[in-house]
Image (spheres, rainbow, N blue to C red):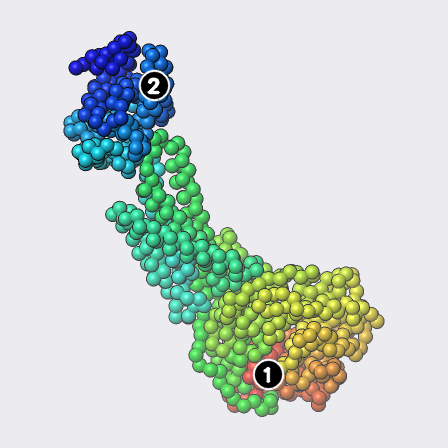
Amino acid sequence: MDLRDQWNRLLPHAQPLGDDLLARYAEQHRHYHDQRHLTEVLRTVDELADAADDPDTVRLAAWFHDAIYDPQADPGENEEVSAQLAELELAAYGVDAAQVEEVGRLVRLTAKHDCAPDDKNGAVLCDADLRILSLPAERYDEYAAGIRQEYAHISDRDFARGRMSFLQGLAETPLYATDRGHADWEQTARANLEREIESWGPKAARPIGGLIPIVYFGAALGVVVAASVLLGRGLGAASKWPADPNEVTGFPVWAPVAGTLAATGLACAWFRRARQKLLAIPALVFAVLGVLGVGLCWWHWPAAQPGAAMSERWPYLMLASIALILAGGLLALARRLRRAPPYSQSPPQWLGVAATAVCGALLAWIVVSAGEPFVQARLETANTVSTTTTAAPTQQPVQLDGTLAWTREVPAAGAIAGTAGGVAELRSDGVVMSDANTGQIRWRYARADVNDAASRGSKGLLVSGDGRIVAANLPYAAYRAPTGIDLPTYAVLNAVSGEVLTEVHTDGRALAVDQNQLLIAEGNYVAAHGVSNPTHWRTRLRCNVTQGELMGDQAVVVDACAGNGAVVRGLDLKTGDQRWEVKLGDRFDLSAELDPETWVGDLVAVPDTREVAGLIWTASAGGTLYQWSIDVGDGRVSWSTPVPGTPRPRLGPASCDAQLAATHTSLVLITCRNATDPTQPQTYDVSAASPADGTPQWHHLLQVPPRLQQPEYARDGFALLPDGRVVTLMPQVNGSCSPVMIGTAGIQPHPILPGASAKSVARSEEVTCNKPATTVAGARPVFSDGTRLFALN
């Protein structure tokens, strides 16, 4: 029975409608949804008629289900207009309204083939419409080819992706709703679907699928960067920091090797098409570790960013964390791209380009950001010569009899300082430590990029209260460092062994150092950099910070500016929070128009007490110098007293500097009595007072010849012996240069006598008083005259 006869049997009085429907199914653009498809659907409805509640109604719906077919219509639109056509035409030919409504419902049902379990009519029509899926492979291939012809206006890739999306949607649900369909046709239909899906796979490549290898490469690079930064602190750096002397030229092979192994694993995962779970696990691990690292940095990031310590791991941890997050995110993206179903339409071409550009920019940023610390670490390593020693300094008794213990010619030396490790010399390129008893060099730290460190004078060397830590100011020549690279300007060293404890870049000035902290003034900021711990903070004060000391768990600082006077503050050493303050301007008549550097003097800690003492100059009486002491436990002024003699010149290098030193029993002050003609001898005050209440203990006036009258002489030219006496070099009437001891017994010159251990290195009469510098190391006075270093027994 042909199609016309089947229609006439259904609606014999509507032959024109049947002719119209046959004409529609014969349209030229139909290559599958044609009369052959209609015939197959009606044949299947006949086979399943017993399963339907109203077989004729299902047959009418089959005639109309593809009556209108436009391949360019939106999804569901063809079924909707076909249902409307059925409702309009059938009603016009007098078909029962309930049957018309049911036909419309069934036609609309073929848009998604999602009939309810109790919808028998719907089940029969949907199974009939999908019967083609279970036909033999030859007929199925004809069906698939016909569908492709109907969508000839769509490119192969877009059609393949749309077709795969449709087929995968079918494959994820039961195909047939009737018992016979599910039992007899399901297996064959699924085999046909899988075969077609596989055939479309190569043509359905996603436009951004080519990005997946780039994504894997990015993830691998992120792991390499993270491993190199976090484990090795940069390519070319030592395997740990501070570096052992024997490792400064070593290459942290295991750091990039770890990253390379991870990268290799990711590459294998890509080429071997690893299971999705194998990609999800490292993606999740990388992302979680990265987020935890960023969170840790966010929570504990040091406040003192200008001048961050080179040994601080925070910048490197942040960089490694970002790299890990990027690696995890890229792996997750690659997994999502691989799992993503094809799209019915191609994403715009700019999406692939933009995604590639974003990934490339992120990776470039990582590499560039990582490059700076890498280069910085390599520069530090390449330019640094560092030797250490495990031997303890020699110990010999000191008689202070004036005999020459040793002497050695030195290059143009800067400051010298006594330490627990011997005599520290600040040279133009670094620091040299000599044994205080023999004069032999114990260790050396030098950098090729340092720019004349010796010119910093006594301010270029800081020694901790116990003498075991040395901080050296080593300004580098900017032209020797690449643009954007900040090399360290301070090196903190173990005075006994020469071990590098930390290196710090700062534009500020170091105030104090101990085994835990380096205290630095940066304008009106004060910063603490951890030496042996990660403590790191930066606190803003109202005025410029001029002085500072480390006392127990506090940093005591002085900030001063015109109009505010001077304020002494106690800051918590762990957080930088202020504990107390003392306004010196409330106690002294400070001159508001003066530069604070000219009236705020030394700040010293009195050993084994809670007292800190300092100097302040006021304009009263033509110039008065005061000593004061503060109990740092409760932040109160213990005492203050004027230094005898007025008027006094202002403090500072522009006038006459002053040195305040402390022992357990005395506060010793060396300063100018007045500003005189530089061609005339100048009078210096050398005095001692009780640290308990400021009561004078002894006081002497020392005549200083014009050739020694340098502003820094009071600071550089005098040193304090353990017994409280002051020692300096002074020209004598006979033209010689001799040490002078100043104390309770008065001013006592001690001519230098050749010692048994001096041998032929130098004779005592060769000692000059040019550019004298004095210190005490191992209870032994040590002097420098600019050309040689010598020590007395």
Q: Residue 419 at what x, y percent from top left?
A: 55, 78
Q: Is residue 370 above or below residue 715?
A: above
Q: Is residue 210 above or below residue 646?
A: above
Count of numbered labels shown in the rendering: 2
Is residue 498 something that shows in the picture? yes
Kind of residue at badge 1: Pro
Kind of residue at badge 2: Val
Q: Residue at x 66, y 76 (%)?
A: 633
Mark 2–mark 1 CB contact (< 8 Å): no
**221 left or right of 610 in image:** left
Q: Secondary structure at mark 1?
A: strand
**676 left or right of 725 in image:** right
Q: Residue at x 45, y 48 (%)?
A: 365
Q: Residue at x 61, y 69 (%)?
A: 572
In the figure, residue 789 lies in which quadrant? bottom right
Report the front residue among 732 and 27: 27
Q: Residue 484 at what x, y percent from top left?
A: 51, 53
Residue wearing tag 1 = 781
- Nearer to us of marks 2 and 1 is 2
